[in-house]
Amino acid sequence: MVTVIDGRNLIHGRLASVVAEMIMGGEEVVVVNAEAIVITGVRENTFRDFKAKVDRGDTTKRKGPFYPRRADLLFKRCVRGMIPWKTSSGRDAYRRLHVFVGTPKQFEDVEKQRPAEANRKITGKYTTLGAVSKFLGSNVR
């Protein structure tokens, strides 16, 4: 059973925790429209925090940590932080997660879920994962 989640206008951290719980339970999860996932908070602070994570690894000397720039991989990295990554059960769970920018053709006609925990009314400042990705220099839009 594959669960397809539409990430449009869902809160980043809340969605990641719901997805982490689902994949650890053995479900296969597909998240579409990752570029439209919302990160709450001041835009400049969000950009600064993500830029610091990217700059932490030195790619010229092949030293890690290597932090992604694409919106789909940024979301996967967030979920990875919420599962026991260093155990075999965590690695197997991570393989059950698939994230896409936009909606691939095979998932256009499928019924998509929107978890109630991640679907909150946004009243303050926010930015999208796509805007963060663009700021970090990703070519995938």
Image (cartoon, rainbow, N blue to C red):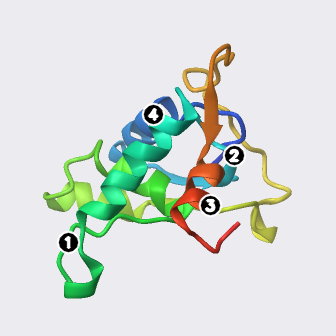
Work out whether mark 4 precedes mark 3 in sequence or the reverse, and give the earlier one.
4
Q: Which residue lies furthest to the bottom in this view?
A: 61
Look at mark 3 in the image and give the residue it sits on: 134
Work out whether mark 2 precedes mark 3 in sequence or the reverse, and give the earlier one.
2
Look at mark 2 in the image and give the residue it sits on: 36
Can you give x and y, in whole percent of width and height, for residue 51 in the image? Answer: 40, 54
Mark 2 and mark 1: Cα distance apart in space? 28 Å
Can you give x and y, in whole percent of width and height, for residue 13 in the image? Answer: 45, 33
Look at mark 4 in the image and give the residue it sits on: 13
- The label nearer to you, 4 versus 3, is 3
Disc 3 marks which amino acid?
Lys
Left or right: 48 as drawn, with respect to 93: right
Q: Within 10 angstroms of label 4, few (less than 14), some, or many (20 or more) residues?
A: some
Disc 1 marks which amino acid?
Gly
Q: Within 10 angstroms of label 1, few (less than 14), some, or many (20 or more) residues?
A: few
Work out whether mark 2 precedes mark 4 in sequence or the reverse, and give the earlier one.
4
Disc 2 marks which amino acid?
Ala
Secondary structure under tag 4 reads helix
Secondary structure under tag 2 reads helix
Q: Within 10 angstroms of label 3, few (less than 14), some, or many (20 or more) residues?
A: some
Work out whether mark 2 precedes mark 1 in sequence or the reverse, and give the earlier one.
2
Q: Which residue is drawn at 63% across and 37% down?
A: 127
Mark 4 and mark 3: Cα distance apart in space? 19 Å
Q: Which residue lies furthest to the right in this view?
A: 109
